[in-house]
Amino acid sequence: MDNPSTPHILIIYTGGTIGMIENPETGALENFDFEQFKLHVPELRQFNYHIDALAFDPPIDSSDMEPRYWIKMAHIIADHYNHYDGFVLLHGTDTMAYTASALSYMLENLGKPVIITGSQLPIGQLRTDGKENLLTSIEIAAARDQMGHPVVPEVCIFFESRLMRGNRTTKINSEGFNAFRSFNLPSLAHAGIHIKYETHLIRRPRPDAPFRPHYLLDNNVMILTLFPGIRKEVIDTMLSVSGLRAVVMKTFGAGNAPQKPWFVESIRKLVNRGVIVVNITQCFKGTVEMHRYETGLQLLQAGVINGYDSTVEGMITKLMFLLGHGYSHNEIVRLMNTNIAGEITV
Ligand code: ASP
């Protein structure tokens, strides 16, 4: 029997490199199931925690991630919310930042840690980074303060040595172990000999409201990355797709775009059609300031919304979430410039 103060942790294994094995014939990495996975981490038994696991069947490469899987993850967390103190979600690195962002909106007023991690090398390989990522994530998910409250009641990504807010994080390296960064918000914790938490940066749930999961998402959205020489036909074709409701536009520098009249006119027409257009910068660090240059100001005048310092993953999933919940156009415009899950500095 567990001591009542023993932390209860649920591992949710969705797939990704961490649980893959090399196919001897093709050399390609393929998923293997969670039972085999556990055999490679005997250390799990050394924790003084009660640890259970649930696995996606079949596990998926995160490049196949879809909103319906985010809904499945939110259901699993909500259904087990009262029985566990923290959740560790194992996920492929490729779209981990999108999942972390989506869950940060879907799990409203979260009061327990949801720590997402994965690895660059499969758990079965000698030099794997998966073990350290998994074991430290479990420790973070179980951490409590002196009052017995969870230290990190947020959706986070833990990778290599950094704990980062999920909706501020981006994958920046396809081969290094240090694969994720949160450029516009410092890490919430660093893991070295000790795990050092930056408690002043960590969000807390509102004490007057319950945890509220959400399951509605609308993927009638797109990301438009500008580049010098982009053609009118390309923009007009992309933006005329039927059913399109929102666009994240990745602009230059502080939120600037070409001054060509046809370009501004295309964007103005799009906004007048009721499509929401959000301006974020292609730079990793810094914020959009549409007042700063004429090239940004004209976007503001065309009705484009400022995405400030948020990530593309954070904005595209926020739009899916707000559109999915049937907010009015004006409400969405207002909420895009409201910090709802720590995703933006307005
Ligand atoms: N393709 C893999 C995935 O995202 C890569 C990884 O896990 O690192 O599922």
Image (cartoon, grey):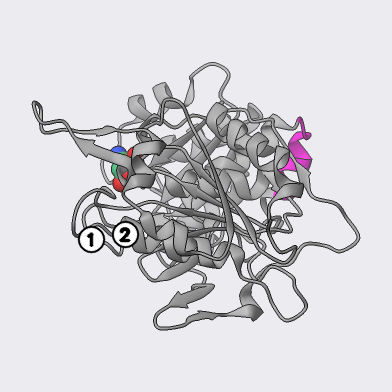
Name the residue nearer the viewer: 262 or 330.
330
Identified at 47% across, 26% down, the residue is 239
Reply yes or no: does residue 253 show up in magenta: no
Compared across the picture, whether 233 is left or right of 82 comes to left
Magenta stretch: give its range. Answer: 326-335
Separation (CA) of disc 2 from disc 1: 6 Å
Q: Is residue 323 above or below residue 312?
A: above
Q: Residue furthest right?
A: 208
Residue 339 screen position, x and y as percent: 69, 59
The quadrant of the rendered image in which ligand 1 is seen is top left
Judging from the image, what secondary structure is the residue with disc 2 in? loop
**Main SS of the magenta segment?**
helix
Q: Work out which quarter of the rendered image holds the N terminus and state it.
A: bottom right
Name the residue nearer the viewer: 75 or 313.
75
Identified at 58% across, 61% down, the residue is 49
Name the residue nearer the viewer: 251 or 215.
215
Q: Is mark 2 within 8 Å of ligand 1?
A: yes
Residue 80 screen position, x and y as percent: 70, 42
Callout 2 crowding tier (Cα within 10 Å): few <14, some 14–19, many ≥20:
some
Q: Residue furthest front?
A: 1
The reply to whether dot 2 and dot 1 touch (C-beta < 8 Å) is yes
Identified at 77% across, 40% down, the residue is 330
Residue 270 screen position, x and y as percent: 56, 30
At label 2, which amino acid type do we have?
Answer: Ala
Reply yes or no: does residue 332 show up in magenta: yes
Q: Work out which quarter of the rendered image holds the C terminus and state it.
A: bottom right
Mark 2 lies on residue: 179
Judging from the image, what secondary structure is the residue with disc 1 in? loop
Label placed on residue 176: 1
Residue 96 screen position, x and y as percent: 43, 47
